[in-house]
Image (tube, grey):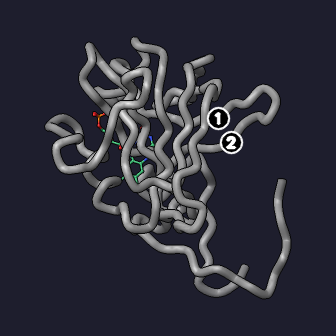
Amino acid sequence: MARGVSQDVVDELEPARFRRALSHFASGIVVITGTDGGAPIGLTCQSFSSLSLDPPLVLFSVARTSTTWPRIARSGRLVVNILSDVQADVSAAFAVSGGDKFGRVAWRPDDDGLPVLDGTLAHLTGTISGTFDGGDHLIVVTAVSSIVESDPDALPLLYFRSAYHQVVERRDDGAQAD
Ligand SMILES: Cc1cc2nc3c(=O)[nH]c(=O)nc-3n(C[C@H](O)[C@H](O)[C@H](O)COP(=O)(O)O)c2cc1C
């Protein structure tokens, strides 16, 4: 094994060590929003992923300790707001439990009254199609019913090794994934 590289068996992993190892995987950041009795609610999520093109499905996982999630789940409808690189403060605002998360961010209700954050790259609106066991998290599958791409030139907010980062575009490589 290379010098400086250590290997742990999963059984012996401390949660903090596991979390640190997973932090090497970079991701974008979304804020999941919804309503409870007409009031806007939301939480920051890194665990968002595309799932299916036909039918259009996305997924994210949410901690069983989340106080916001059961309230969004009750309504069955949600918005996935994909944050841009200037929205680290928005991510932080929605990553706290309790308080007025919408007080410090710009947002508007969509035609159905669901809260949409301003300044994002895009947002997806959908209905919860399934919730599955994921250990101390729930895996939430959402059927997407509408999409809005707000700013095709904006760049995403990234989360990597427990810190926010920005994309640096490589111009020497034309490889594309599906
Ligand atoms: C960058 C970042 C990514 C996060 N990703 C997730 C996630 O994928 N799932 C989750 O349940 N919580 C995630 N959190 C934590 C939640 O945002 C936070 O626990 C939540 O807002 C708690 O509020 P609530 O009690 O109102 O649900 C993340 C936090 C940050 C800062």
CB contact under 8 Å: marks 2 and 1: yes
In the displayed structure, 164 sits above or below 119; it is below
Residue 137 visible somewhere in the drawing: yes
Cβ of disc 2 within 8 Å of ligand 1?
Answer: no
Q: Which numbered tag is attached to residue 93?
A: none
Q: Position of residue 28 (x, y in %)?
A: 53, 57
Q: Is residue 90 above or below residue 49?
A: below
Q: Is mark 1 within 8 Å of ligand 1?
A: no
Which quadrant, please, contains the N terminus? bottom right
Badge number at residue 58? 1
Reading the image, the residue beneath label 2 is 50
Ligand 1 position by quadrant? top left
Name the residue nearer the viewer: 37 or 129. Answer: 37
Q: Is residue 172 above or below residue 93?
A: below
Tell me which corner region of the image, top left, top right, bottom left or bottom right, holds residue 107. top left
x 63%, y 29%: residue: 144
Q: CA distance from mark 2 to mark 1?
A: 4 Å
* Label 2: few (<14), some (14–19) or many (≥20) C-alpha neighbours in 10 Å: few
Q: Residue furthest front?
A: 111
* Of the image marks 2 and 1, the number of the one nearer the N terminus: 2
Counting from the top left corner in percent of width and height, residue 72 is at 39, 22
Q: Which one is nearer the viewer's eye here, 109 or 178?
A: 109
Q: Amino acid at mark 1?
A: Val
Q: Secondary structure at mark 1?
A: strand
Question: Residue visible at 31% across and 54% down?
Answer: 90
Left or right of 162? Residue 154 is right
The quarter of the picture where residue 117 lies is top left
Where does residue 59 sit, x and y in percent of width and height?
61, 34
Q: Measured along the vertical axis of the image, is residue 161 above or below residue 72?
A: below
Q: Is residue 22 visible?
A: no
